[in-house]
Amino acid sequence: MIFSTPVFIFLFLPITLLLVWGINKKFHNLILLIASIFFYSWGSIPHAFILILSILGNYLFGLFISNSRLRFINIRLGLGIIFNLIVLGFFKYFNFFIENLNWVLLSFNQNEIGFEKIALPIGISFFTFQAISYLIDISRKTAPVQKNIINLALYISLFPQLIAGPIVRYKQISKQLENRNLSIKGTVSGIQRFIFGLAKKLIVANSMAVVADQIFSSPIADISPGVAWLGILAYTIQIYFDFSGYSDMAIGLGKIFGFNIPENFNFPYISKSIKEFWRRWHISLSMWFKDYLYIPLGGNRGTTLRTIVNLLIVFFFTGFWHGANWNFIIWGMFHGVFLLLERIGLGNLLEKIWRPIRILYTLLVVIIAWVFFRIESINEAFQYLSRMFLIDNNLSSKIFVIEFIDKKNVILWIFAIFYSLRFFRGIKEFLEQHIVFSKKNNAVKYILITTKYVFTAGLFFLTVLYLSGATYNPFIYFRF
């Protein structure tokens, strides 16, 4: 089940909310756990058993680690991490390794290994990383071991962020698992955030997905350089509004049920460097890798060479985490190389350059990297880049930009660009600073608050119209 469907919006969510509000507080975690398992089972009942295996395994390893003497704690933690990586590796990377092994065997004229492809359980990368953070947090004594299996199961399987993040650390939410309060104010705020994220997904991301998919499904030799740029720009907007939209919905759902889920995006397309981009894009993942991989490897505390190696390791796994394919690894390493360049001197140079140029530099690097993220074939990705930058000598184009231009798309493009550049947030902050919180303008304050509610209701009505008339509602996280 996914958030942007009628069954979730009009059945699952209202029923779950009514049950939580109508039942004694001590049963809230149990109700949410049952709802989360049902939510995950909706797509595949067999895959729900993998989630349950992860829950049981990490519950036992948590107790195993917490009862360990200090000198044995790292050994037990290592076994717990290996357990999680085996589960993740088998279901997500088995096909990748066998396919690459077969490629090597064929290169040496050997017979291939016959195998049946394993279906990828949705969200396995997210809940596995959450489980690992649980084990590490209790081994570091930064969070208490969870002896109540229902509470731990809810942490790993909580449906708002189960299939698309953000990745919530156990220490961020451990106290909320034990004690949290539902409130009308939190529910209203959560509903508003959910509607906003839903609109980003259905109205903007899905519309951009239509343009991007049409272009990327066309023969590269047939598209003009302008169309190539339009395709990757549409995908650049699609993935941001889709991913941040799901994060908004997760954060909103968390508020509805009393949880504070951390922010995951902070206008990454206004970043002035790749380093800043990763402080604003998929924040929960980048911080996870920083705290649980980069720093344990030594971070930047060693030699320059060691720092370079640590960064490349982190971005290799950042790419590999996103999908079992070489294109994701190239995407991650591409970002890693530019981070290294900024660390060894490019960053100092950027500081001296006009801010808009720095933003354009970052966007160019990010957009080029998105080509590898979007196109699974490495050869096709380079062909697409060749068409974008006029390196391809064959310019007998049959598909031109004018074919993708209509009034609706133009309005969405303008809105998406202004939103991504933080224009509307700037206006909101200005109004809040100079009008809303001014004691002398209470009337204006109430008018603006009323306008906010009316706007939210209108936005929800518009998303329902899109949902009822939509024939295309892609879910891009099946690969993650």
Image (spheres, rainbow, N blue to C red):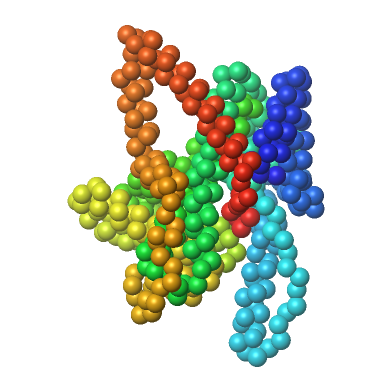
Query: For residue 335, which quarter of the picture?
Result: bottom left
**Percent position of residue 31, x then y:** 76, 30
Q: Is residue 332 visible?
A: no
In-front residue for pair 410/112: 410
In-front residue for pair 248/386: 386
Left or right: residue 240 versus residue 159 is: left
**Percent position of residue 22, x then y:** 75, 19
Quarter holding the C terminus? bottom right
Residue shown at 20% from the left, 52% from the top: 353
Q: Is residue 396 visible?
A: yes
In-front residue for pair 156/308: 156
Query: For residue 236, which quarter of the picture?
Result: bottom left
Number of numbered markers: 0
**Percent position of residue 107, x then y:** 60, 87
**Percent position of residue 99, x then y:** 65, 74
Query: For residue 87, which quarter of the picture?
Result: bottom right
Left or right: residue 141 versus residue 447 is: right
Residue shown at 76% from the left, 45% from the top: 42
In-front residue for pair 125/451: 451
Residue shown at 69% from the left, 41% from the top: 157
